[in-house]
Amino acid sequence: MNQVSLLIMLFAALITPMLMARFKITFLPTAVVEIILGIVLGPSLLGLVHTTNILKQLSDIGVIILLFLSGMEIDFDLFKKPQGTPSPLAQKNAVQNSKWSPVILACLAYSTIIVISLVLAGLFKWANLFSDFWLAAILFATISLGIVIATLKENELLSKAFGQTVLLIAVLGEVVPMLGLTFYASVFGSSSKSLWLLLLIIVAAIFLLRRFKFFFNFFEQINKSTTQLDIRLAFFLIVAMVTVASSVGAENILGAFIAGIILKLLRPSESTKDKLDSIGYGFFIPIFFMMSGIGLNLRTLLSDPQALTLIPLFFLAYVIAKLAIYPVLSLRFKSANAIAGTSLSAATITMVVAILQVAKNMHVINAHQSGAFLLAAILTCVFSPLIFSKAYRPEAEDLKKQTVHFIGANIFTVPVAQQLTQGWYDIQMYTDNEKNYRTYNSEIQIHLLENLNAEEMIKQGIFDTDILVVGHFRAQENYLLAKAAKAYGVERVIVRFEDRNILNKHEKELHDLGIEIYNTPEVNIAMLRGLIETPSTMLLLNDTTNTIFEVQVHNRKYTGLEIKNLPFIDKITISQIFRNHRLIRPVGTTQLELNDRLIFTGSKNDIEEIRHELGKMN
């Protein structure tokens, strides 16, 4: 019977994503569908699967891995202040930016959630609807980080100020309830111990973090497919922290959550996270969610008048607890986006399921109350993403093109600028050569300058750009301008050197500063060598419809995706991937990783959009 129930659940877990893809069910999170599937398979409807020892053990492992992966979702870089003194350009941009930073808005928004959740918990206790004040407050304050990340990633908002703000609110919506649950279980749990012992969890976390601080640097040198050391480390951290948490009277899920944070701080590669996601979401976590649905008996739940009353009330409480996010988000973002962010923050499922499991183990909640909390949470996950997708509108700052300023108008720079204006770039061109100005101004708008003095260019805002191309012929002047631009804070400076003597003198210094260098003779030599070694090179270079391109993958929407599953793979051919200082020859099953550099060919008509899509900072 054990094997039959497990087989049915694994088959259901297998076909569920396939059916969702086949019928284009994108508005429901997978976790919600799996809980509903558990309800269908369990005693509520078909009665095909019943709780068994092996399923319960697998479910317990599932919640531990789920919380571990939730800990890994937290990006603490969002809370960091920039190191060192900001550059003049960064200071200038900071003045232009809103005073309401994502961190300030998120902390302010979540403070309102805590206050409203406490008030709502008090009202439920006063009305004799739910007597456990602290448990209710913790549940109402939860936010599903997984659903928020998935939605923001799908809409390519993780790198935008709006997306970062909503993401930080969701991070607090997992961390704070987790800490609240820890103290709640320590105070009210039957196996609780002294609260000061909880500090041992932090001590153990710090010890493990310091012990394995440089693990992944070493791991890259000895990694073999048969050892999978990164996965061994992950499970060692899970078991170690769960053991410590249990020993001091805390909950297992706290230890797993902190283990995830430790691994995140160790900065594993994207492939490590993909492998852990495969283990968790491929096997254990679906069983946990389906078992949550199987344990929910709708027949008895819906026959109880009190439970029928609690379901809509709990749903309203989940939503009302997040309503004050709207005026906070309105301080910086459009009203429509404030509504979108508020609705998405109301989605809650992951922490609710985990908290309810702890509460049932502590015997502080009955089955009807637990079922009402769970069904209400499922409803938030149905409506929240739908409202978000209908309400969200791009902010003005999100539509801004990447700026490129050219210094020097000549036969090399003008054609490049002309082509870039047709893509996702805002181009400005400057020259102090009046003859070149008259020659090329009819082909592209050029600004004539009296001189190329760096201080004067800063005053005129010429260095206020994402990319600066210093492309005229005077090598010494190029050198001084490139250094001045980099010191001012321009992120990318590309400089041209035709005088090899001056280049040899300054090349190392410029490379150390992060300045990119090119010169025409070396480019021509590389082309000729390529033509000799690879005759098809010239065909590609002269082809008016196809050519070679390179792009660095910044868009997390595509990380972890196999090349064969890229939505635009039929329009390009990827020849090589540059990853971790080495070249990889890709195959269809090769997964993209963050910061991969793709070398590919494709049609010029499609290429700019594809490069823009892959290169988005998301």
Image (cartoon, rainbow, N blue to C red):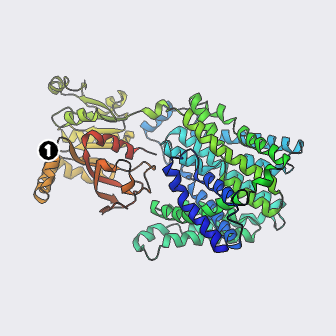
Please give left or right for residue 546 compared with residue 176 in the image. Answer: left
Residue in the image at 25% along x and 43% along y: 603
Identified at 45% across, 38% down, the residue is 90
Q: Nearer the viewer, residue 440 or 374?
A: 374
Q: Position of residue 156 (x, y in %)?
A: 47, 43
Q: Position of residue 590 (x, y in %)?
A: 37, 61
Tell me the kind of residue under disc 1. Asn
Farthest residue in the front direction? 46
* Left or right side of 538 for 309: right
- Residue at the image point whose x is 14% and y is 49% from the top: 539
Q: Percent position (x, y) of residue 23? A: 51, 48
Horizontally, is 302 left or right of 332 in the view?
A: right
Q: Residue 15, how many percent across, how many down? A: 53, 59
Considering the numbered disc 1 on the image, is that residue within a helix, a strand or a loop?
helix
In the image, is residue 319 above or below residue 269? above
Is the residue 364 above or below the residue 424 in the image? below
